[in-house]
Each structure stands twice: as structure tokens, then as C-alpha cells.
Image (cartoon, rainbow, N blue to C red):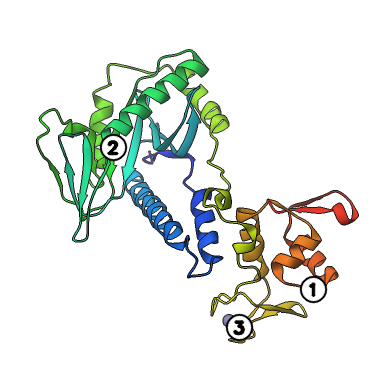
């Protein structure tokens, strides 16, 4: 018999927030006063996403077809949203993985903080074990509310960065068993599952999980310009040249050409319209399209928008193209 592998019921995709940060970084002038904030948030989110993707590789070694995986779940417990990096369903217990990608020397101190020391700075983070416990409580509550059942929920904090030595200082009650490195992950998951071997989750309960989790998941979807006190006017308009990165590609017959480096592209407007969708609105009129793409012809804009949009709504000057 062929050995089975864990089934991924919700794959990991690049978070909308990260895509929005990339788009806003691309379209802000490099000397803009908010660029530093944007870039530091972008770097943090990118590191998180990289760490999670690195862990996904180790999870492919889980040697059993009766595991199912959900990546990046965001659920509401009745009062607050909570986010789970990875949820692993086993027949005995539900396991939350809280994935951390923090570099430097990591110290779990007596104030229940995680300190990070690098050559440049010392910084404190929330203790990831506390975060994990909170998620366990919220998931238990969520499942109780929607299924009426009490599922066993446990978890692990996974340190994704291999260049981050860890140390516990003045913290005698620290629960080391909750923290694991990426290489130990599969082994630790199996040990954790084994400790619940006496407990079998009824097949009927397990079957109810997939439709519930997928239906209730809600990706974080926030207006990034508002959040960073930016206006439409501060966003660079135009179609970007992917070679020299300037924003003044010109529309010639059937193609875009960069006046600076002569690079030619047929579909350079796709990125511009994706950026419009991420930053401004999922709907665009012909007039808005002309202003954003910096194309003067109404007819050319119409063809570009028709070719890219997934649908159209309204009539004549009120016609809007739906970008997603
Ligand atoms: Zn160019």
C-alpha cells in the first residue's frame, strides 16, 4: 500500500495584507515620509510569511493520510477575530501551530516576554506560548459555539529560524514542551498526538470541521491607504516598466513601451490594475482607468479594462469594471 500524506484542505497563499504592502511600497515615492513605516511592516510580514512557508515543507513529512491541514485560518470567536498559522486535525486532537520567524538570540524571560537580541538592538515580543494558549481557548470556544461539542485542542510554537539560539532565563515555570524547532516538528507532533491516544474524536465530529472552517474563515481585508493616512493623490499613477521600474510606460499599438529603456510589454497594465484593486477599489470606470493608467484614449482604455476585468456592472458613463 502506498504511504499517504497529510491532506491540505486550505493551502497557504500570500496574504492580502502583504500584497497590499508590496503595492503601496511600489507606488510611493522613495522619499515619502511614510515609506519607512510601510517598509518595516512589509519586512515583518514578509518574514512571517517566509517562516510559515518554510514550515510547510517540514509538514510534508507527516506520514499519515488521516491528518488534514488548514493554513492561515482567521475565525471569529463571538467577540474577537483570531488567526491560526496552521491547524492540524488528527483523529485524536486538533493541533495549532503558531509559527515564529524571529532571528537573533532569543531569551524567554521572567516577565513572560520573548526578548530578541541582535548586534543592533534588543527588543521584546509577546510570549508566543501565551499567544498559543489564547488561540487554543478561542478555537475551543469557536467549535463549542458552532458544533456544540468539546474538541480537544492543543498546540506548539514552532521556531522557523534556524539561526536563532534560544535560552530561558529566571523562568522556572517555563513550559519548554510547547516550543519546538522546525527539524523536530514532525516528531513533536506525533508525540503530542500520542499523548491523546486515549481520546478518539468521533468521525461525525471530524467530518463537520471542513465545511465549518472553510465557511467561517474570513481573510483580513483592510483599506491600506486609510490605515497609513495616505490619499489617492500620493499614489504614483501609470504603468510600471518591469525593467527600469519607472512608471511611464506608453501605450502604442497593441503594446506598452518604456520611453527610458525601450522595454516592450504586452500586458504591463495588469500589474497597474492589480495595484488599483489592492489600493483603491475593486471597481473602476473608464475615466478612472484613463487617469490611473495614464492613457488618453477612451477606446484603448475600454479594451484594456474589458480584457482584464472579470465582470462589468452598470451602463454607459456609470459602467464599472469589476477587477476581482
Ligand atoms: Zn524602462
Residue at point 16% right, 31% down?
174
Left or right: residue 183 versus residue 215 is: left
Image x and y of residue 248, in percent: 64, 77
Helix, strand or loop for disc 3: loop
Marks 1/3: CA distance? 21 Å
Instruction: Specify the quadrant that holds the N terminus.
Output: top left
Which of the four quarters of the rendered structure image does ligand 1 lie in? bottom right
Residue sitting at x 16%, y 38%: 109
| Residue 244 occupies quadrant | bottom right
Above or below, comparing residue 89 to residue 121 in the picture: above
**Residue position for label 1:** 296
Q: In this rendering, is residue 268 above or below 60?
A: below
Q: Which of the labelled discs sits on residue 128, or is there none?
A: 2
Image point (46%, 57%), residue name:
38
Which x, y percent locates residue 167? Answer: 13, 44
Q: For the residues marked 3 and 2, what is the alpha-carbon distance in whole angstroms?
A: 48 Å
> Which residue matches tag 3?
263
Left or right of residue 185, residue 49 in this image:
right
Amino acid at each position: 500500500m502506498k504511504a499517504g500524506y497529510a491532506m491540505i484542505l486550505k493551502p497557504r497563499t500570500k496574504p492580502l495584507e502583504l500584497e497590499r504592502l508590496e503595492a503601496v511600497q511600489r507606488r510611493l515615492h522613495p522619499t515619502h515620509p511614510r515609506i519607512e513605516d510601510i517598509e518595516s511592516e512589509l519586512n515583518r510580514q514578509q518574514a512571517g510569511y517566509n517562516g510559515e512557508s518554510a514550515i510547510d515543507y517540514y509538514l510534508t513529512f507527516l506520514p499519515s493520510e488521516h491528518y488534514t491541514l488548514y493554513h492561515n485560518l482567521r475565525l471569529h470567536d463571538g467577540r474577537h477575530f483570531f488567526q491560526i498559522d496552521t491547524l492540524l486535525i488528527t483523529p485524536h486532537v486538533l493541533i495549532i501551530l503558531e509559527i515564529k520567524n524571529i532571528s537573533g538570540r532569543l531569551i524567554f524571560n521572567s516577565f513572560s516576554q520573548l526578548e530578541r537580541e541582535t548586534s543592533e538592538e534588543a527588543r521584546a515580543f509577546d510570549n508566543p506560548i501565551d499567544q498559543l494558549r489564547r488561540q487554543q481557548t478561542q478555537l475551543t470556544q469557536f467549535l463549542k459555539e458552532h458544533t456544540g461539542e468539546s474538541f480537544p485542542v492543543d498546540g506548539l510554537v514552532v521556531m522557523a529560524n534556524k539561526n536563532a539560539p534560544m535560552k530561558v532565563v529566571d523562568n522556572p515555570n517555563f513550559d519548554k514542551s510547547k516550543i519546538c524547532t522546525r527539524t523536530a516538528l514532525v516528531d513533536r507532533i506525533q508525540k503530542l498526538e500520542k499523548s491523546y491516544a486515549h481520546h478518539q474524536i468521533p468521525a461525525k465530529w471530524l467530518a463537520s470541521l471542513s465545511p465549518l472552517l472553510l465557511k467561517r474563515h474570513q481573510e483580513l481585508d483592510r483599506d491600506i491607504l486609510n490605515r497609513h493616512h495616505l490619499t489617492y493623490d500620493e499614489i504614483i499613477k501609470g504603468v510600471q516598466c518591469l525593467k527600469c521600474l519607472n512608471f511611464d510606460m506608453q501605450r502604442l499599438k497593441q503594446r506598452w513601451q518604456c520611453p527610458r529603456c525601450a522595454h516592450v510589454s504586452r500586458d504591463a497594465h495588469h500589474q497597474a490594475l492589480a495595484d488599483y484593486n489592492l489600493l483603491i477599489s475593486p471597481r473602476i470606470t473608464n475615466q478612472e482607468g484613463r487617469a490611473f493608467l495614464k492613457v488618453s484614449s477612451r477606446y484603448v482604455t475600454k479594451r484594456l479594462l474589458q480584457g482584464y476585468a472579470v465582470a462589468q456592472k452598470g451602463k454607459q458613463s456609470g459602467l464599472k469594471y469589476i477587477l476581482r
